[in-house]
Amino acid sequence: MPRPAKKNSLRIHFGAGSAVAALLVLAGCAASQASTVLALNDDSIVLSPPGEELVAPSGQIAVGDSISGKYLAARHAEIENDYGQAADLLLGVLEAVPDSARLLQRTQLLLAAEGRSKEAVALAERLVAIHRQSPFANITLGLNAVREGDFASAVARFDAIERRGTNQLLAPMLSAWALYGAGRTDDALAALRPLAEVSGFAVLEGLHYGLIADLAGRGQEVEAAFERANSNGAIPLRLALAQASFFSREGRWEDAEAALEAFRVQQADDFLLRPSVAALAERQTVPRTVTSPAEGMAEALVSVARALNRDGGDVAALVYARLALELRPGNAMTQTLLADILASQSRWEDAIAVLREIDEESPYSWFARQSLARMLEATGAFDEAVLLLQEMVEERLDRVEVAQTLGDFLRLNDRFDEAVEAYDVAVERVDEIDPRHWRLMYTRGIALERSKNWPRAEEDFLKALELRPQQPLVLNYLGYSWVEMGLNLDRARRMIEDAVAQRPGDGFIVDSMGWVLYRLGDYQGAVEQLERAVSLESGDPIINDHLGDAYWLVGRRNEARFQWNRALGSNPEEELEIIIREKLQGRSLPEPTPVGERDS
C-alpha cells in the first residue's frame, strides 16, 4: 500500500511552548536539593521556567499540606498547562510567604492567564508595594485603571515599565493610548516614536499613530502615518481596514477600495474583506477598527499575543489574549486567537468553548467553524466535525477550502470513497487549476488510489507534478505506487531518488527508495536503504516488514523474522498482519521478484 511521505494527521500544531515566554516567565535556579523543606524567605523560592522542574517518577505529586508540596504540585500543574490549579496551589503557598515578589508575580501571571482579573489585580497591588517597577504588575494595574476610566493612573503605570524585551514593543503602544485617553494627544503620538527606530516595529508605529490621529480628527497626519506603516510593501489586514475606514469617511471611495485591493492581491483568500468591500460598493463607510483608547490597547495586546504564539509563547501569549478580550469583549478576531493558543496547549475543551462564543455574523465565524471542526476531530468527536463541515460545504457554494478539508477528514479516517466525493466538489469549485492547487490534486489522488481507482489516481498525481514539478511528496507517492504495481520501475526509481535528495531525513521516502531497489532485484542496496528508513521511522510496520523481506533474500533469515515480529508489534493494518503471519509460519515467503516493465 503506497503512503504519503509522512503520515498525515488532522491534529493541530500551533507551536511547542518555547522559551519566548521567558519574557514574562521568571527564570532562576531550582531550590536546593540538600533540604526537603523550602526555606520561607524572599530569595529562597526561585522560580524556573516550566519544563525545568523535577517531576515525581510516577508522574503524580501528592499535594499534602506542606508548603513545599503545594509549590511542587503547582509547578507540575503548570507543566501540564493546568494554570488554574497551579494558581490555586500557589495562592496557598503565598499564605506562608506573602512577601515573595517572585511568587507573587508567578501567581499573578497564572491568574491572568485564566482570566481571573480581580485576583490578578489584587496580587499586582501587593507586588508593586514590594517591587514598584514590576512590569507585568504595572501592565495589569494600568489596564485595570483604563477599565475604570482613570487614564492618568494608567499613564503613570505604563511609564513605570522598563522598555526591554516584549515591553520594548508593548509599553509604548499602551502609553500612547493612555495618554490619548487622558487628553494628551501630542504626547500620545510622541510616545510611539521609539517604535519607528526599531527594525520591524515601524508598521505598528504607523498603524497606531494613524488610529490615534484619526480619533483626534487630525486627517493629514492619519494619511502620512498609514503610508509609513505600509512602506515595507506588506499590508496587514488591520492596516488595510483602517485605511479603508478613514478614506470612506472622507468620501474618497476609490482610495478606500485601493487600500483593500492592496491587501487582497497579497492574500490567497480575501474572505475577511468582503463586508468592507460590499459596504464600499454601496458607497457606505467602513466601520472604524478602533473606537476608543481601550480598543486601541486591545489591538496592541493582540499584536504581541499573536507574535508570541507564533514563536511558542504559551503563557505570555495566553495572558495578552485574555487581557485584550477583557478590554474588547466579544471581539471575534481575539477570540479566534485565544482559541488557537488554548489549542496549542491541548486545552481542547476550553478552545472549543471560546470558538462556540463567536458571533455567527462575524466574518471570522467562517474560519472559526473550520477550526472548531478540527478541534472536534482532535477530541474524538469525528461525526460532529464531519457534519459541521458538510453543512458549511452546502452553505457556501463558492468556497473550495472547506470541501477540501472535509475530504482530508474523510481520507485520514479511511473513508476513501466519501473523501473522493468531497474532493470532487472542491475541484469543481476551482475556476482554474493553477500551481496553488497541487495539494488538492495530490490528496484526491491518494483517496482515489485507496478506493482502487488507479487510472483517475494516476491522472491526479501526474497533474500535481505538472503543477508543482519535483514536489517530493508527489514524486514519492506516485513512484511508490508504480513500484508496487511493477510499472515504470526505472522512472519510479529516478523520481524517488529526486524525492530522497530533497528529504533525506524522511523515513517514508527512504523506504520507497529501498523498496524500488528491492523490486529491481538489488537486494543488498535495498537492505542499506531500508535499514536507514527503519532508523528514521522505527515504529512503522510497513517499513519493518520491507526490511524483513530484504533480509530474507540476502540470507539473513533470523534478522528477517525479527523484523517481521517487530512489524507485528507495531499495530499493522489487518491485511498486512495476515501477510506477515503467513511469512512467520513459513508460508508465502519472499522470492526474487521480476523487475517488471522498465523504461527505455
Image: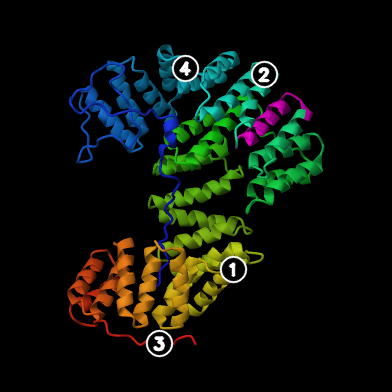
Instruction: Name the quarter where the N terminus is drawn.
Output: bottom left
Front residue of this view, candidates 131 and 357: 131
Report whether residue 286 is seen: no
Kind of residue indicated by mark 2: Asp
Q: Earlier in the sequence, mark 1 or mark 2?
A: 2
Q: Earlier in the sequence, mark 4 or mark 3?
A: 4
Q: Which residue is found at the position 37% from the left and 82% from the top?
A: 520
Q: Earlier in the sequence, mark 3 or mark 2?
A: 2
Per the model, the C-alpha gap separating discs 2 and 4 is 22 Å
Q: Earlier in the sequence, mark 1 or mark 3?
A: 1
Left or right relative to 158: residue 571: left
**Main secondary structure of the magenta stretch:** helix
Left or right relative to 187: residue 565: left
Asked if the residue at tag 4 contacts the one at tag 2, i.e. Cβ–Cβ closer than 8 Å, the answer is no
Q: Which residue is mark 1?
A: 467
Kind of residue indicated by mark 3: Gly
What percent of the width, then of the height, locates residue 514? 35, 73
Kind of residue indicated by mark 1: Leu
